[in-house]
Image: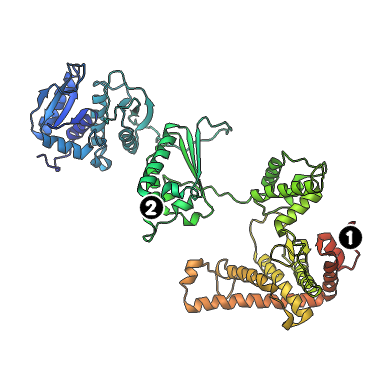
Amino acid sequence: GVADDVAVTPALAWLLGVYTARGEVSRDGLELRFGSAETELKQRAAEAVRDVFGAASSLIHPPGAGADTECQALSYPAHFAQFFERQCGSSASGKRVPGFLWAAPARLYRAYLDGCVLACADGKPQGGQLEVASSDYGLLRELAWLASMHRDRATLRSGPAPKDGNVADNGSGGNTFWMLEVRPALHGDAPQHRTAAIESIRRVPLSGHVYDFCGCDHEAFFGGNNAVLLHNSKVRSLFSAARKKAPSIVFIDEIDAIGSKRNPRDQTYMKQTLNQLLVDLDGFAQTEGVVFMAATNFPEVLDPALTRPGRFDRIVQVPLPDVRGRAAILKKHAEKIQLAGDVNLNLVARGTPGFSGAELQNLLNLAAIEASKQRARKVTNKHLEFAKDRVIMGSERKSAVITPENKLATAYHEGGHTLAAMYTPGAMPLHKVTVMPRGHALGITVQLPETDRESVNRQEYMAEIDVCMGGRAAEELVFGLDKVTSGCSSDLQRATRVATAMVSQFGMSDKVGLVAYNDEQQKKLSAEGKRAIEDEVRSLNELSNVRVMKLLQDHREELDRLAKALVEYETLDKNEIERAVKGLPIERDDVK
């Protein structure tokens, strides 16, 4: 037989190109088929086989040539067929570019391309442009990649079968053929893939198809009980449909459900799903008109292979909307809602920092529901304020039975938070305070930033801890240490979380130093390192408690006035808080 260590020469590469376009493997061996007008090409192929392998050719009329009785073929024994099939595949299994060409010099690539072109174009390259036609899309895609590696300009397009019928066929017998146009690189040619210079942006409707699905909803779609059959067929059919309907967009929501980091202990179908997705993503060229998009709230859990260059390599962060974005979202969702004339959505947007798009939509929906309950014709600012409080603080539990003693303790607790927020430098401005039970809380003190917060400094973090400690400090100051309630547990959790982040992630501790440890790194710290972080966090909380206790002692009369007002009115806004601490009366139309 023919050994695999045949010398790799331009003549061999040229022959492999001719075989890719014209070669057929039959029971009798290898056949290189030619038409009646291709005498010169046939003679050149026979001489190349004789020079490379030292073998003579047999001229036959291949069976199945159809009406063309002039068709002839150069025939070679079976061991030649095995050699060429090992290098380039066969029509039955799909032909491919020889593996050695990916690392071969340019002269071997050009010899192979010359053989493909001559065999596909009756020996006549089309001017300065080389053309290869085939029904095997995968073969031409590989050849286009190979051409790009050598800086040639390669363009792949679909079209009808060539009239002369000279194509590199894969045996599929399909009616759709692909044409690869290759223009050899000239001196001074710029690289094919350049950075685009954007001159203008226009919004136009997509004249293609959009495939939109959710990863977590379609886990059974990709895996289920019969993982191999389902995910192999369904994923391939999706990518095939996107390619056929190009231009198209494939959007995968919650991709972390199927694209999380692989682990040897994972179920088999989970790994096969991601593997198939990775393989199909690699099978698309830049010129196919298919765009793949995905979304996740946990990018850190995605498998690294999914985000490497060539796959999902362009990451677009989608943060919470700023004030302009919130205004635009509110105006969009308010198109079908009757608003009162004095409602200014820009003011609502400025008063809802940190709200997501879903929360803004929910705000308008709750306001419309409240307006309908009151049989109002239009949504007013009062309804919007009600909805805003509902989103921030939760729904009121008006049916809850609270004893006067618990209500008073809650009033002092929230009063401590409120005074700490008022008099601590760096604290966020107050919005509202209430002792009306909402959700699982008996009372809530709400702070809202005046503008969108891009970053937080050390003073602001310390103020946040002080505000958290205000409730417990007020209870201890008024009722004594033995009467401190369990209502401060959530405050301590929040203060500890902030202090831990300051010490272990933001480098805001002199004792621990300028370090940043994530959760995994903290687990690997030494006992001394963990103890240093714990001691510093405890110190920050205890020093904060001392500061707030001193602040409340200095403003004890204001604390008593505020607690009394909260017991009476239950909910106070910013202006009412300021009047209450000064001892001024609070005027309300709905309170007698």
Lower position in the chain sequence, tag 1 or tag 2: 2
Identify residue for label 2: 269
> Residue 469 location in percent, x, y?
70, 73
Residue 66, image x, y percentages:
21, 19
Depth check, front residue: 573 or 499: 573
Is 449 on the left or on the right of 129, as rendered? right
State the image coordinates of residue 272 (x, y, percent, origin top left): 37, 51
Tell me where residue 509 sits by quadrant: bottom right
Q: Nearer the viewer, residue 271 or 100?
A: 271
Label 1's element?
A: loop
Q: Which residue is mark 1?
A: 591
Residue found at x 81% / y 60%: 573
Label 1 Cα neighbours within 10 Å, binned few <14 / some 14-19 / many ≥20: few
Answer whether residue 287 is visible to the viewer in this image: no
- Which image quarter is the N terminus in? top left
Q: Is residue 569 left or right of residue 263?
A: right
Which amino acid, by three-letter code, is at mark 1?
Val
Residue 204: quarter of image:
top right
Picture quarter containing residue 418? Answer: bottom right
The disc label shown at residue 569, or none: none
